[in-house]
Amino acid sequence: MKRTTLEFRMPKVNEVLGSAAAIVKGMSVTFREMMQPTITDLYPDAPPEFEERYRGKHVLQRDENGLEKCVACFLCAAACPANCIYIEAAENTDAKRISGGERYAEVYNIDYSRCIFCGYCVEACPTDAITHGHGFELAGYSTSDLVMRKEDMLAPVPEGAHFPLLVPTAVAGGGGH
Amino acid sequence: MSDIVHLTVDGKAIEAPPGTLLINAVKRAGIEIPAFCYYDGLKLQAACRMCLVEVEKTPKLQVACTLPVAEGMVVHTDTPTVHEARKGMVEFLLTNHPLDCPVCDKGGECELQDMTFRYGFGESRFLEQKQHIDEKQWSAVVYFDRPRCINCYRCIRVCDEGMGLTALGITNRGVLAEIIPNEHDHLNCDECGMCIDICPVGALTSGMYRYKTRPWEMKHVGTICTHCSNGCKTTLGVRNDEIIRGNNRDRSGLNGEFLCIKGRYAFDFTHHAERLQSPLVRRNGKLEAASWSEALAEVAKNWTAIKQRGGRFGVIGSTRTTNEENFFLQKFARQVLGTNNIDHHRSGDVPTLLDALSGRTDALATTADFYERKAVLIVGADLSQEQPFLAWQVRANVRHHNAHIYVATPGPVREDRVAAASVRYQEGGELASLENLREKLRAEPELVVAFGDAIQGDAVRQLVNFGDSLGVPVKYVALLDYSNSRGALDMGLLPHLGPGYHAVDTPGMSLAAMLADESLDALWVVGANPLGRHVLAASKPFVVVQDLFLTDTAEHAAVVFPAASAYEKSGTVTNLCGEVQRLEAAIKVAGTKPDLEIFGLLAREMGANLGIWQASKIFEEIRGSVRGYNIPLPILTTGGAAQTAALNGHVPAPPRAERIQAAHNTLFTSGSLGQFSRTLQVVLEAPGALYQGR
């Protein structure tokens, strides 16, 4: 086997300067970023932050009076490609008013073992009742845990709203029309 | 004048008979002209102006729904002017129409919604406040939302012409025009719901279906109504094993779109709170819930013991169970229990009619004959109350074909209004009263005769003789009570006749005789409530009942089996005209079993082999062995109605003539079953004059 000899060559000045400049450039990024606020989420030690349009667990919205916005039109269920939304509708009465429209969703379930978070339901909703929230901790020990009920998804009653909005019983005697 | 008119529509050459309306003529060429107020079979209204088309040589757009075709006519339906006109009309209709489609029950099957998508602007230019009027409830089943109404008058016309009622009218003019019910603030009518069905928008909505679901969420199951004997097809909307609505918008079945209150709303007994969902066995004098195996064993043990000591059995069948079940039941009674004591609640004298018409092939009327034949004679029945579909056919026949209707009843009936002649009789004078009509009937080219239980026994033969003496072709039908009253007769639930009206060797006891027999050891009642009207004479018979509810009869039972209703099973039923149609199971109610399965399990428990208890297999047997039932299967399997063939041969008369007593249900009653339909219980009843004081 033929041996090759390693030859030492003096570096040129411009090469030295070039290397030094590269280090300075690299370190400048490092030092600059050290001064910036951190972008690493500290989850689970701290809650993560989401972009505004992140599609997480759904939230069923209420209007300013605390009434549910959902009028049980079933359009979200119709739009859902995963067929994961189940609704049972019921009629509002003067004595028991749940939503602003003539009817409300008595049962509203989303099966998160099937939901693909495509957002079609949100797009289909004519009353902006269903929105994607930022909830994402949806893991469970069984698939039945993943079926969320209306109560699990409803937005809290806003401050100052009178909920449940009940007409005084004297007026409610009519029982609807 | 030539028989055919030639015209050109959108460049296509079309032929149509003279007098055809343009809107109908173009359909055959595959061209659609949109319309709201035009409705096949109803009078013209020309109210909605949606069907405007361009006709050459006419200065203005023409209304296609009132324009008869003319020779050489050149029509354009696809021009910018027509498009503009349609857009304008939709915009006008939407002026006051609330855009509440998400909460409107019609959403998804709304004609206005469809038309707006197809022909409308897509956006609204009106900024003005829409007129709002609160929704009104007119009856338990009819709600009216004025702002949604587009004043097409369909509801008014279907009620007036179709139902013969005029329960709806219109008040005010212009934007204030409003549909009003006959009693100012509520309806007093048949509550048939035809107005709701025919409404192209969500102005009229159903109290039953109200806000429950959306049309696309339901499974639609076409089956046969279990109430009266007309055999209407009702398409049940099912969600979560619950029937939510009934209608027949696809016009399948012999009834087309027609349904009365029972077919449309009275399915609600299926989920009545008192529905039996577990077998009951009497222990220490009290009926207690038991398992199926316990109950079956209890029955088999007792029946075997009674049979061994030569005891007397009595079997009472149902007028609502399927042909297959009735056939299997009589086979069970005759072969396993060894008795001919089998009967059911008879409501019309079909055996005598078939005997009198023996050998004739064209003397049995179909439901279609009531619409097509030139004259109809009704004897002893308030058709609008008892046979609503036949009454609908009769009214349509008068409207479309100028048919002549003759009525012979004890009191005034709704058919009098369309009748060419009406006669009244005292009980017993039925046939004598027909003599007054003889001359008029003789002048008719053809005739359909429908008769109730007033004509029975020898009177049936006299009626046929009367028909023969007229010298015109006559078809007959004996009016019956329930969905399979005819099937029960055909399948041999009779003490003296087996399936196909063949005589049995030793005639057994009739229903009345069984109940009056003091030494009866066992009574088996399937889907009937004889003890609601009669008293059981025997002191301690072993009573077995199969029913949906704990009826008066079931309360006397030792064992009660929870049965499935007609909407929960498959099989076939035969209507009063002998037309066989298929049932389709819509739902399943937990804990119940179809009667056929109960028979099968009982047979197995008794150690008897009656063959496989599957409806399709038994129907094959029926087709092969029951006279008249060799009907074409393709008609049945595609949801059609196949009429059974007429008999050729003698039908023996019962050994002792017994009075046949029909229930004479009104539109709002349906025997024992009617008590468990909330809808039938809550509507304001408006029975005919024949039922005043009943």
Image (cartoon, coloured by chain):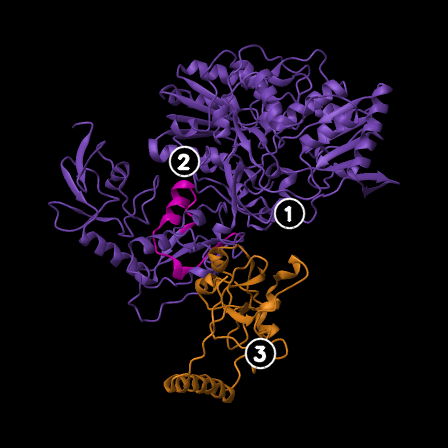
Q: What hue does chain A carry in this figure?
A: orange
Q: Is the residue under label 3 in contact with that under label 2 (CB below 8 Å)? A: no
What is the magenta range? B141-168
Query: Looking at this view, is B43 or B275 the one in front?
Result: B275
Q: Is residue B414 magenta?
A: no
Residue B476, compared with residue B665, is above or below; it is above
Q: Is residue B424 visible?
A: no
Residue, disc 3: A162
Q: Which amino acid lies under the numbered mark 2 shown in the image of this protein?
A: Arg
On what subunit does the disc labeled 2 rest?
Answer: B
Q: Give how far across and how far down residue A123 sits, in percent.
A: 44, 64
Give left or right: position of B34 versus B275: left
As measured in the structure, the alpha-carbon distance from the residue carrying label 2 to the one carrying label 3 is 57 Å
Q: Which chain is purple?
A: B
- Tally the numbered discs: 3
Residue, disc 2: B395
Residue, disc 1: B271
Residue at 65 percent of width and 26 percent of height? B326
Circle 3 — which element? loop
Q: Which amino acid lies under the numbered mark 1 shown in the image of this protein?
A: His
Query: Looking at this view, is A88 or A13 the one in front?
Result: A13
